[in-house]
Amino acid sequence: MRKSVGQIQAEHEHGELKRSLGAINLVLLGIGCIIGTGIFVLTGRAAAQFAGPAIMVSFVITGLLCAFVALCYAELASALPVSGSAYSYTYASMGEGAAWVMGLLLLLEYGLAASTVAVGWSGYFTSLLHDMHLMIPPALTAAPGVPVKDAAGTVIATGVMNLPAIVVIGLVTLLLIRGVTESARVNNVIVAIKLTVVIAFIVIGARYVHPANWTPFVPAEIPVRPPGTNMDIWHQIGRALLAVVTGDNSTKYGIGGVIHGAAVIFFAYLGFEAVSTAGAESRNPGKDMPIGILGALVICTILYIATSAVLVGIVPYASLDNPAPIATAVNAIGLPWFAVLVKIGAIAGLSSVMLVLLYGQTRIFYTMSRDGLLPSSLAVVHKTFKTPWINTIIVGCAAMCAAGFLSLDALSDLSNVGSLAAFTLVCITVIYLRSTNPELVRPFRTPLYPLTPILGAVMCLVLLLSLMSTPATRNFFLIYLAIGIVIYFVYGIRSSNLGRGVVVGGHEPEPFVDLPRKGDLDS
C-alpha cells in the first residue's frame, strides 16, 4: 500500500498543529540541533580513537555527504511539507511497509540521539559543578558499569546511573509539552548564547594553539603495514574502503581512521534534517524549508572545522577521549573565567540539541499515529498548548531511560546507524518521485540530478557499513529491525488507516489523486 502525494498534501492542509515558524526560526532550529554534540562531545572521541588531527578532514567528508543529503531533504520538504519528515516521504514513494521501517530508523536517530546528547550535557554540568566546588556522587554521573575518571584520568568510581542526564531530559520534555512557539523562543536565545561561546573559543583558543599538536596530521596506521606495502594516498583510500565493505576494524588511525571518524561524527550533523520535521508548523514551507535546512548546514560546517582545528591544536588529540573535550581544552589554556563561560555555553548548547531532537521524534510519532500505525492516543493534541502531549511524555520517558542507563559510545553508534540508513532511503525517494511524479510542484529542486542523490546514497552506505563492522552495533540493529517488522505485521498492518480505507480528518481530502502541476502555479 502506498499513500499518494496528493493525499499527504491534503492531510497537511487539515492538520491541527500551529503554523508559527518562519525561515529564521527554521535556520535557528537547525543550528540549535547541529551545534552541540559534534563540537562539545564527539569531536574528542573521534580524534582520540580514529582520526587524530585529521578530524578536520573527517568533518569535511561528513559535511560534503550531508550537503548531498540536505539537498534531497530540501526538495522533499518543499514539495511535501508535513510533520513526518522522511517517514512521510517514504510513505509516498515505497509504500507503507518501507515507511514503517523508516519510522523505526527515525526512532533510533532522534530518540537515542537526544539521550546521547544528555550524556554529554551531564559531563559538562558535572565539570561546571566541580569548578564551583559542588559534587554529585560519581556513581550517579555515568551508566551502569561505565568507569568514572577524575581530571588526571584515574578511575574513581563505576557508574550506577546518569542522574543529571535523566533530569535534563525530563525538563526538556516539560518545555515541549508547553508548546512549539515557546520552545522555539527558548531555542533562539540558547542558539545566540552558544554561537557566541563557540566563536569565542575559536578566536581566543587560536592564540593557544601549538602547531606541533597537528603533527603528524594523519597518525600512522596501527598496526603498522608490512614492509613493501604501497602507502601512496590512493592505495590507502582503497584499503580503507575495502575494510569498510568487508567489516574489517582491526586497524586504527591512517586514512581508514579518518573515514571511520567521519562515520562517528556524522551524529553531529543530524540537526539539518530535523528542520524537515517542522513542515506542518512552517508558515511558508515551500520557501522556508530549503532555507532552514541548507542555511543551518552551511553555517555549522564552517564552525565545526574551525573548532576542531583549534581543539586538537590546544591539547594532544589522545587526551580528548572523554564526554567533555572542550572542557579539557579550556582547562589547559589556564583561563578560569573562560573555562566557566565555555562550559555554560556547552550546557546551553546541548540543551537546545535535546529540545530539537525530542521535538522531531514526537512529530514523527504524531504522524504515524494519525496514519493508524501507532495507537491513536499519540496523536491527541492538547486543547490549550496545541501539542501532542501524551506522545511527548512517552518519548521523554523512553529517552530518560536510555540516557540514564546506556553508555555514550553505544548511544551514538546506534543513532548514527539509524540516521545513515534513513538518509539512504531519502536519497532514493527523490529519485523515485522524480520518475513517478515528474510534474509534482517542487518549489526547490535538487541540483545536479541524479548525481546528487546517487552520491548521497552511496556515501551513506559506505559510512553505514563502517559502523556495522562493530558486532555489538550490528547485532542490536538487526534484532531491533526484526522485532519492529514483527510488530508491524501483528499490529500496524491491521490498524493502518490506509489499509482500512479511513481518511484522516473523517472525510476524503481534495485532491486525493490529482496532483498539483507546474502549470497550476502559472495560472
Image: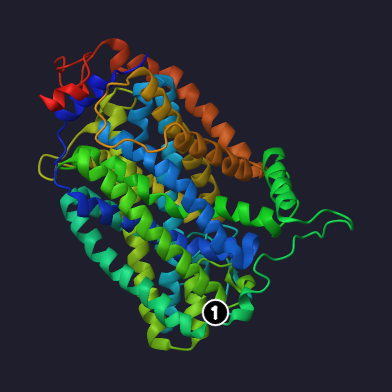
Q: Is residue 378 left or right of residue 523?
A: right
**Closer to the camera, 377 or 424?**
424
Q: Is residue 198 left or right of residue 237?
A: left
Q: Is residue 354 visible?
A: no
Q: Among all residues in the image, which is located at the extreme right? A: 227
Kindly identify which residue carries mark 1: 314
In the figure, 366 relative to 163: above or below? above
Quadrant into which the C terminus falls: top left
Q: Is residue 382 visible?
A: yes
Pointer 1 local density, CA inside 10 Å: few below 14, some 14–19, many at least 20: many
Q: Residue 157 occupies which quadrant of the picture?
A: bottom right
**Closer to the camera, 428 or 84?**
428
Residue drawn at point x = 53 percent, y = 42 percent: 417
Q: Is residue 246 left or right of residue 325?
A: right
In the figure, 245 relative to 259: above or below? above
Q: Is residue 18 left or right of residue 340?
A: left
Residue 325, percent from left and from top: 51, 70
Q: Residue 283 occupies which quadrant of the picture?
A: top left
Q: Amino acid at mark 1?
A: Ile
Residue drawn at point x = 32 percent, y = 20 percent: 437
**Closer to the camera, 386 or 319?**
319
Residue 145, percent from left and from top: 60, 58
Residue 114, percent from left and from top: 40, 51
Quadrant into which the N terminus falls: top left
Residue drawn at point x = 43 percent, y = 31 percent: 102
Q: How many marks?
A: 1
Could you tell me which secondary element the residue under label 1 belongs to?
Answer: helix
